[in-house]
Image (cartoon, helix red, strand yellow):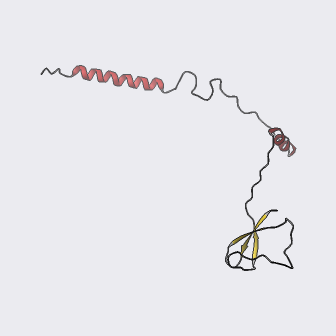
Amino acid sequence: MPIYEYECLDCGHVSSFQEKMFERPRLFGPKRRCEKCRGKKLHKIVSRFGVSVERTQTEMMNELKSMGNVQFTPPPPKPSWGDGPPPGGCPYEKQFQDEQSKKDKDERDRKAKEPIVVG
């Protein structure tokens, strides 16, 4: 049985009740009341729900095709090298190596120009 939610028009509290889908309000017997203020003025509201359906991919495709003219395209092929970097390594690797070699050369030149202190 589904759970329906009702909002109290007096206090605004939302109450939940289990009932059949096409159940009419009860004329005899216990009536629905707000859980907070026990008011009788309840208004049915739209609430969230969840559905869990297990289907195969073929069943889903057939259902989508029955809804109209749907063109399915296959996913793009994966590159031969996988998910890693492109062949040839990182495109910034050469730039990094050039900068590093320039820094090393500058450091060697600076050390060569320092005076030698003998103590």
Residue found at the very far front of the displayed protein: 29
Question: Number of callouts in the render?
Answer: 0
Quadrant in the rendering for residue 111 = top left
* x then y, percent, for residue 102: 36, 23
Residue found at the very far left of the displayed protein: 119
Q: Residue at x 26, y 23 (%)?
A: 110
User: 86 and 18: which one is in front?
Assistant: 18
Q: Residue at x 76, y 73 (%)?
A: 43
* x then y, percent, for residue 82: 63, 27
Indicate the quadrant containing the C terminus: top left, top right, bottom left or bottom right: top left
Horizontal side, residue 7 vs residue 118: left or right: right
* x then y, percent, for residue 17: 77, 69
Horizontal side, residue 12 vs residue 30: left or right: left
User: 94 and 10: which one is in front?
Assistant: 10
User: 5 and 88: which one is in front?
Assistant: 5
User: Against 117, is 51 above or below?
Assistant: below
User: 1 and 67: which one is in front?
Assistant: 1
User: Against 83, is 31 above or below?
Assistant: below
Quadrant in the rendering for residue 27 = bottom right
Q: Residue at x 22, y 21 (%)?
A: 113
User: Against 102, is 1 above or below?
Assistant: below
Indicate the quadrant containing the N terminus: top left, top right, bottom left or bottom right: bottom right
Q: Residue at x 73, y 60 (%)?
A: 48
Horizontal side, residue 70 vs residue 101: left or right: right
Quadrant in the rendering for residue 41 = bottom right
* x then y, percent, for residue 39: 72, 80
